[in-house]
């Protein structure tokens, strides 16, 4: 199974990677989703496999955390992601 290193976007709805949203204990503990809603989105490094979409590995502070798919992540609309992308761009983030 090929592992891919990439960046995921921390949003108010979860950690967005590969058109899905994920969450993990570290993100909840540090209130990442609340902070993303207040201050804007940001990128975090992740490791994933296209064959296993139920979880990704989040690289943070030299440690690896397992982030699991948010229930009903497939039902979140594209409109919400476009809104987040617009907000990130207006805050000076890159696409």
Image (spheres, rainbow, N blue to C red):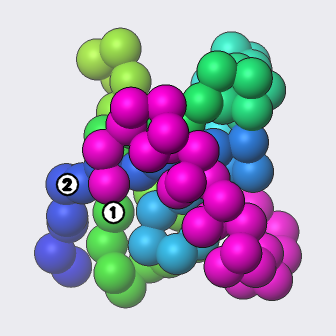
In the picture, the quarter occupied by the C terminus is bottom left
Q: Find disc 1 in the rendering and name its residue.
A: 48
Query: Is 20 inside the magenta-drawn segment?
Result: no
Which percent across, then down, holds residue 16? Answer: 54, 57
In front of the other: 69 or 80:
80
Which percent across, then down, holds residue 42? Answer: 46, 33
Residue name at image x 75 percent, y 32 percent: 37
Q: Find disc 2 in the rendering and name its residue.
A: 5
Residue name at image x 66 percent, y 59 percent: 83
- Residue 44 image-quadrant placement: top left
Q: Secondary structure at mark 2?
A: strand
Region in magenta: 68-95
The reply to whether residue 23 is in sight is: no
Query: Is 85 inside the magenta-drawn segment?
Result: yes
Which percent across, then down, holds residue 52? Answer: 44, 78
* Above or below 32: residue 49: below
Q: Is residue 13 left or right of residue 39?
A: right
Q: Residues within 10 Å of mark 2 (few under 14, many from 20)?
A: some
In front of the other: 79 or 30:
79
Residue name at image x 52 percent, y 56 percent: 85
Residue name at image x 38 percent, y 32 percent: 92
The reply to whether residue 84 is in sight is: yes
Which percent across, then down, holds residue 86? Answer: 55, 54
């Amino acid at each position: 199974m090929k592992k891919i290193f990439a960046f995921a976007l921390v949003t108010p709805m979860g950690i967005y990677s590969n058109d899905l949203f994920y969450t993990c204990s570290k993100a909840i503990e540090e209130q990442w989703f609340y902070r993303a809603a207040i201050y804007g989105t940001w990128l975090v490094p992740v490791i994933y496999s296209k064959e296993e979409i139920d979880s990704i590995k989040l690289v943070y502070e030299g440690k690896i955390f397992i982030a699991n798919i948010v229930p009903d992540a497939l039902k979140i609309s594209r409109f919400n992601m476009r809104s987040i992308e617009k907000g990130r761009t207006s805050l000076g983030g890159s696409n």
